[in-house]
Amino acid sequence: MLSIKGLLVSFGNRQILRGVDLSLERGECLAIVGESGAGKTTLGLSIMGLARGSAAGEISFQGKNLLTLSQEELRRLRGKEMAMVFQNVEDALDPVQRVEDQIAEAIAVHRSISAKSARDMALQHLLFVGLDSKKARMYPHQLSGGERQRVLIAMALVNDPDLLILDEPTASLDALTKADMIRLFRSAILGRICIVITHDISLASDLADKMAVLYAGRIVEMGSAQDLIRAPRHPYTRGLIRSYPSMTATKDLQGIPGRMDHGLSGCPFHERCTQSIEICSRQVPPPQERDGRIIACHRGGIVPLLEVEGISLSFDSYPALSDVSFSLYEGETLALVGESGSGKTTLSKVIMGIYRADKGAVVLEGSRLAKWDGAFYSRVQMIFQNPKESVSHRMSVLEAVLEPLQVQKSGSPEWMLKRAKEVIELVELPIDDDFLRRYPHELSGGEVQRVAIARAIALRPKLLIADEPTSALDPSVQAKILKLLLNLQERMGLAIIFITHDIALARKVSDQMAVMRKGRIVEMGATNEILLEPKHRYTRQLVNCASGRYERDDGDIHPEESLAIRRFC
Amino acid sequence: MHIDPLGEIHHDPLARIGLIMLALIMLMAIFAPILSSYSPNDYTGKIFSPPGKDHPLGTDSMGQDIWVRLLYGARTSLLVAGAVALLSSSLSVIVGATAALAGGLYERFCMRIVDAMISLPTIIVMILVAAYLRPSLPLLILLISAFSWPSGARIVRSQVLSLKERMHINASRTFGAGLMHIVFTHIIPELTPIISALMMQDARRAVFMEAGLAFLGVSDPMVISWGKMMNQALAFTYLDVWQWWLVPTGLALSATLMGISFLSFSLETAMDPRLRKGNVRF
Amino acid sequence: MNNAMRNCLLPGRDRWRSLGRRLQSLFPASVLNYFIALAAIFSINFILPRLMPGDPLQAIYGQEALVAMTDEMQAQLIRQFSLDKSWWDQLQAYVLGLLRGDLGFSYYYREQVSLVIMGALPWTLLLTGLALIIATAIGLILGIEAGYKRGSYLDRGLVAGLMFLGGFPDFFIGILLLLIFAVSLQVLPLSGAISPYAGLEGFAYVMDVLRHLALPLTSMVLVQLGSIFLLTRNTIVTLLEESFILTARSKGCTEECIKYAHAGRNSLLPLTTATGMRIPNLLTGALFIEIVFSYPGVGSILNTAIDSRDYPLIQGILLIVTLTVLTANFLVDLLYMRLDPRVRYAH
């Protein structure tokens, strides 16, 4: 019904839209999300034929290419076949006309109808959106924001358009009004083609069945709204969702480094992307469809960084790990939780190559590991529970941070010194000579842990294994170290395996969670889902303990059962 | 966005036309003694002589050379314009800015006075006052200034009020800056474009008022004024003399007024970012 | 006072408050300003002559007037205005005189000042009123069209042309029209409001009035047009950026409807405010034009009064013109309340 092919819109020599393709059937609702300046509103205005600037490509609606129609032909379609509700509720209505007259006008411009019956129709539609005839006689300034929004909806629906475009329809409304409006929108979009332009991800998931993520004038990811929010595949989509405060996400808010730049060659996102490779800056990634999801990314979306396949390990016939598998994506945190002796640390040592597994494999960035060499350790780093032990007491701060660089022979002495200072700054420590010359015993626990983190990230690893990194620290220091880790993740696209027995802590830092017991992963999935509805009794018990509900659950869990409820691999 | 309105109007053709007009009038005023061989109060003895070698614009009903009176009339107009612009705009700034900064009863009092004065037919008040006090040039300047400042004070006040709420001024207040610091480092520099626009409006009104009052017969008897010349000339429209007496004087007056209004229009357009986009180019 | 009593009183107090609010919604807030302005004029008229040195009668009426007056008349005036008594008595006499409509005696016209002015005022009102209506109508239409097509040849041409016209002082425009149409071409009458001694009646009378009105009216319209046009144009330019215009477009409104029903109607608001502020200027402008065309309005009387130093007449004119200006301002404020529902139904 509505299909857009290769839509280019430029204003002067500024390209706003750089080739947008999408198609929608009647009854479908598409949410277009993205940062401001991505071109969302321009897309809506272009469909309405109201965008300033020049458009090329094709917008076909009801069998006509809208871009070839004359202004007069477009005018006849506007408000009749296609309607748009604008974001600025404050000024979107004419301040000197009664609202019923403004709606009656929308009817009268498209039909030859008496003024009286146009007004009656206007009243009916206002009633439909919940405004009585008393409100209808009022002027816009006498209505509340929600009521004005209702008037705008009534105005858009009054000629029963096929296509409805809502531009930030709830931007200036309070939460309760917003909930009312969403109910109204749901009934308004039935049987129409609907496009919701918003940066509000919860609104998008409430209204739309499809969602497209627009970045610098291009669609970078498009698919079913629910799926897209639950499992974003493009790094930008994930960044967008992580920066959106939602009631269901448990992890702290994270942003996206850098800012949007319209003039880039290649992939528009490559400068802010933590997994960009050489081709990203040269070529625009074509949109590709896989499993009903369209992604424009040279790397096929967020890449799996580490895959652990069926690891088993026994110490003297005692099974320390049995058939453990998971995968971890670039820039994500996996929390390994479980009581002491559940095999968390053993698993991390297998990944680090300290123990060799009896069975199974560790796959890093797509290649199966046979030997753990220097190249491996520049990609994967570890920080330990007790920082004072992991940093030699004979080494000054500077020497400690230089150590991994010297071990890897990563450059000239000057370069290494520069890099060392850079990472010390990155972990928010001072870089004056006095501090660099200090020894671990002269530092606080938090400072030593920061030095340890600086050592770990000096070689720009992609994966960081943190084994109870904060359990030896004061709560206030712990909070700062966790913030630091999340910031580093945001900046470097670091994947983190976070080992802890503290489920409340895991909740704040992780995207995925794996619950271990007796060498097995008994439950695994998105952190918020596991915490909301723990499937396994053991998980339930852990969650209850963490929430302060100390009921004993003595039922033992069979290993077979744990396999059955594993929901994610 | 930083706008430099004074720099911007250099590129505006309208402003250039205005500047050229004003420059010509100013040259006339400055070089009046060089441009004519007569003194403005000389009686040549020939009345109503048409333009010729001796008298580029002929002579008037009293036998005085019209061209030289036109030159000296420019001096009066520009003198009044400059003096009123300075006096009236300083009054506007003082009243407007103090009202906005002090607020309270003082502000309400000032603004009531301003509103009331704006709704007065000022020319007639001036005529009455000047008639009682016997018109002289300084009195006229004082009178015109006394009745010109209110509209400017209103503009300055609203501008200062909005400036007061700007973030950088609040920020400076959080550094502990005093009123004087804020006024001199933030408010006055931001006001300069507005003040220059005000001065131009005041100057235009002053030229018009002086000429208008003189046209009505209220003027310093010792001073040569375009308005007075036009008033005298209007009595002789049945003769051809209007062609070189009435019309050139009116044109000189109009050129002065137009010069100022073109400049101030272009300045206003440069100051309003919403209008800038559609800047009219000729 | 116990609670019950307080509750009994509350509705009453509320009623007063709501009455106050209703009065406020009926009368513009500016009414107070009018009283201040009027008080200022009264005090100028009363105090200024009394500040002059010498005989108060001479100060009020001027030397020339006294020469023309009989002793009897002088004695009557002194009695009437208590000029030989204290300032307080003089003030009482002055205010009482004003309340009776007595503005003093014009020695030049040998008639009551109020009668002289009332004879001239209708002509001035006719001229000013018509000029305001015509200039507003033309300025509005041109301003809307130019602002809508900002940057077009039409826009540039109109801005340049009307800026040029607006640059002329009003009396010079009048003089030019007079010279062209009445002196050179002699197609229209040179002066006056009606042909003297013609004894015209009915339609012929109206046509005669219009023929005499044509030149003064045209010059006033030409002078006023520029500022009305520029204000409307600039308002339209900024209004077109507003989002309710986008809403109107997305409804499918025609260009004409957007131009006039939405942008145009909204541009009336600043235009009305500006008209209110320009009324003093408009009336004084009319006085100049009247002098140029010897049109028998207040301006011509003012000219005579200045030339003959008829002080009471100037004072009377000042008072009446001020009253006219304030009345017009009040009407404009009422009109603004009709036009802007935000003022009418302020919450």
Image (cartoon, coloured by chain):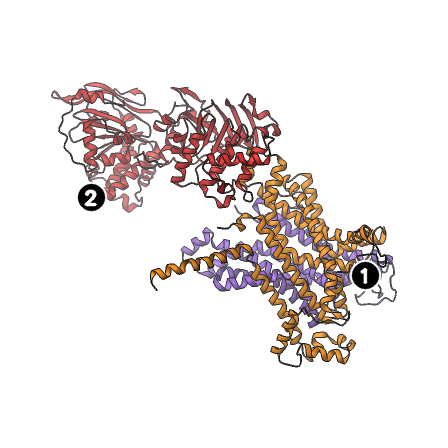
Chain colours: A red, B purple, C orange
Categorize mark 1 by other alpha carbons within 10 Å: few (<14), some (14-19), many (20+): many
Q: Determine if marks 1 and 2 fall on one subunit.
A: no
Residue A418 lies, in percent from the top left, at: 34, 38
Left or right, residue B146 beside residue A6: right
Q: Is residue C347 at least partly visible in the picture?
A: yes
x and y, in percent, of residue C153 in the image: 69, 39
Q: Is residue A147 above or below residue C24?
A: above
Residue under the image location 57 percent in, 54 percent down: B194
Q: What is the three-letter code of the residue carrying label 1?
A: Ala
Extreme residue in the top direction: A359
Task: Tell me the number on the disc at residue B198.
Answer: none
Is residue C111 positioned above or below A232 on the image? below
Residue pictured at 18% horizontal, 36% vertical: A549
Give the crowd class for mark 2: few <14, some 14-19, many >=20 residues within 10 Å. few
Disc ID at residue A441: 2
The residue nearer to you, when weighing A394 against A556, is: A556
Do tag 1 and tag 2 residues touch (Cβ < 8 Å)?
A: no
Q: Nearer the viewer, residue C101 or A19?
A: C101
The chain letter under disc 2 is: A
Is residue B20 visible in the rendered image? The answer is no
Identify the mark at residue B233; answer none if there is no mark: 1
Percent coordinates x, y for residue C305 in the rendering: 75, 68
Whole-angstrom CA distance, mark 1 to mark 2, is 103 Å
- Say what amino acid the circle numbered 2 marks: His
> Where is residue C143, by image quadrant?
top right
| Vertical placement of residue C204 versus B129, above or below | above
Q: Residue at x 63, y 45 (%)?
A: C233
Q: Residue at x 49, y 64 (%)?
A: B105
Of helix, strand and loop, which one carries label 1? Answer: helix
Q: Is residue C67 left or right of residue B110?
A: right
